[in-house]
Image (tube, coloured by chain):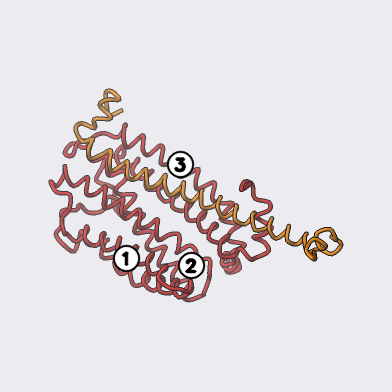
Chain colours: A orange, B red
């Protein structure tokens, strides 16, 4: 360990105002891009699932032999 | 070998391979960045001249190296897309550009903050800093150009051309510290010589560089896969995949 205490580590020998912002911005951008990539993937999967469900229910409605709904449409 | 490369060009195969590789790169990135950060911030000795401000090197150098590697990757993807019309290459290019811009910004920002205690100024218009700023604008130009066309294909081609033209800036950045008089110090790592630092200083730096690269690879694989899902959403394999994928119950 290059420092005697946690306080000394945080103070960075007087260079805290330079070290921590540089590290902070880097960490924020890395964590932010990873988080964004995860949200983006979930969004894609959600959209695809929603579309699949919609098409499946549409196919069921149009399927032959389902008179109840067809009569309702005619009426 | 050629068959493998050919398969990689198919979105379906790329997706399968990328999704398999991805967790390994995320894990490697997490471990390397955690070890490198703790080592660099708390255990590496302070510099005898710069004191603790030198610990900025552990984010500045990896970001700067990666920012340039991203641009080379971007230009390579652009070339593959323009010459062989491989769609996956363009999808990769589309996700590499914003991350490259972010890394260029990190390099510029951490360098500026580092410059205050070391050089006494946060910015000077010297060759290294200026060429790096130009790279940031090139990234932003590539991103803007892609979105500036009504047709996706025109935007993709225009962005690819700018990426290819922009690579001339890479050797300028690299050799700027040798061609011109500059405040910026020469390269920390070279392939031919040992670093002018003790191992307990450059080992954590090497770990951070590797961690940044793994992070970049993991992120690019993941986001390219998302891009494939978007652009290939009409394909049957994507439809079937969505049914099997976990999550998204809403």
Residue B191 visible in the picture:
no
- Disc 3 element: helix
| Mark 3 belongs to chain | B
Sort mark 1 into few (<14), some (14-19) or many (20+) by Cα contacts within 10 Å: many
Q: Quadrant of the C terminus of chain A?
A: bottom right
Residue B135 visible in the picture:
yes
Residue B30, numbered label: 3
- Disc 1 element: helix
**Which image quadrant for residue B94?**
bottom left
Whole-angstrom CA distance, mark 1 to mark 3, is 29 Å
Q: Dots 2 and 3: beta carbons under 8 Å?
A: no
Whole-angstrom CA distance, mark 2 to mark 3, is 27 Å
As rendered, which of A43 and A29 lies closer to the eye? A43
**Which image quadrant for residue B191?**
bottom left
Whole-angstrom CA distance, mark 1 to mark 2, is 17 Å
As rendered, which of B77 and B180 lies closer to the eye? B77
- Disc 2 element: helix
Label 2 or label 3, whichever comes before in sequence order: 3
Q: Dots 1 and 3: beta carbons under 8 Å?
A: no
| Mark 2 belongs to chain | B
Sort mark 2 into few (<14), some (14-19) or many (20+) by Cα contacts within 10 Å: many
**Residue indicated by mark 2:** B90
**Residue indicated by mark 1:** B138
As rendered, which of B44 and A46 lies closer to the eye? A46
């Amino acid at each position: 360990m290059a420092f005697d205490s946690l306080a000394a580590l945080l103070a960075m020998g007087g260079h805290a105002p330079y070290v921590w912002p540089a590290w902070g911005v880097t960490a924020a951008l890395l964590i932010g891009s990873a988080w964004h990539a995860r949200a983006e993937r979930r969004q894609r999967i959600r959209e695809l699932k929603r579309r699949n469900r919609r098409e499946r229910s549409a196919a069921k409605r149009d399927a032959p032999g389902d008179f109840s709904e067809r009569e309702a449409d005619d009426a | 070998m050629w068959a493998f490369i050919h398969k990689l060009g198919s979105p379906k195969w790329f997706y399968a391979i990328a999704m398999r590789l991805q967790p390994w790169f995320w894990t490697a990135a997490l471990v390397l960045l955690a070890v490198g950060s703790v080592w660099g911030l708390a255990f590496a000795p302070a510099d005898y001249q710069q004191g603790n401000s030198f610990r900025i090197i552990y984010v500045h150098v990896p970001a700067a190296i990666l920012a340039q590697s991203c641009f080379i990757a971007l230009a390579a993807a652009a070339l593959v897309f323009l010459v062989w019309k491989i769609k996956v290459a363009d999808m990769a290019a589309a996700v590499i550009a914003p991350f490259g811009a972010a890394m260029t910004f990190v390099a510029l920002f951490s360098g500026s903050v580092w410059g205050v205690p070391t050089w006494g100024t946060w910015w000077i218009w010297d060759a290294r800093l200026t060429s790096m700023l130009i790279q940031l604008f090139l990234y932003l130009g590539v991103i803007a150009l892609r979105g500036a066309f009504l047709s996706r294909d025109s935007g993709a081609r225009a962005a690819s051309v700018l990426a290819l033209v922009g690579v001339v800036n890479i050797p300028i950045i690299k050799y700027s510290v040798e061609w011109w008089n500059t405040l910026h110090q020469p390269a920390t790592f070279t392939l031919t010589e040992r670093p002018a630092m003790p191992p307990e200083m450059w080992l954590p730096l090497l770990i951070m560089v590797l961690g940044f690269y793994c992070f970049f690879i993991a992120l690019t694989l993941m986001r390219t896969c998302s891009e494939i899902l978007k652009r290939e959403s009409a394909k049957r394999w994507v439809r079937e995949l969505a049914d099997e994928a976990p999550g998204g119950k809403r």
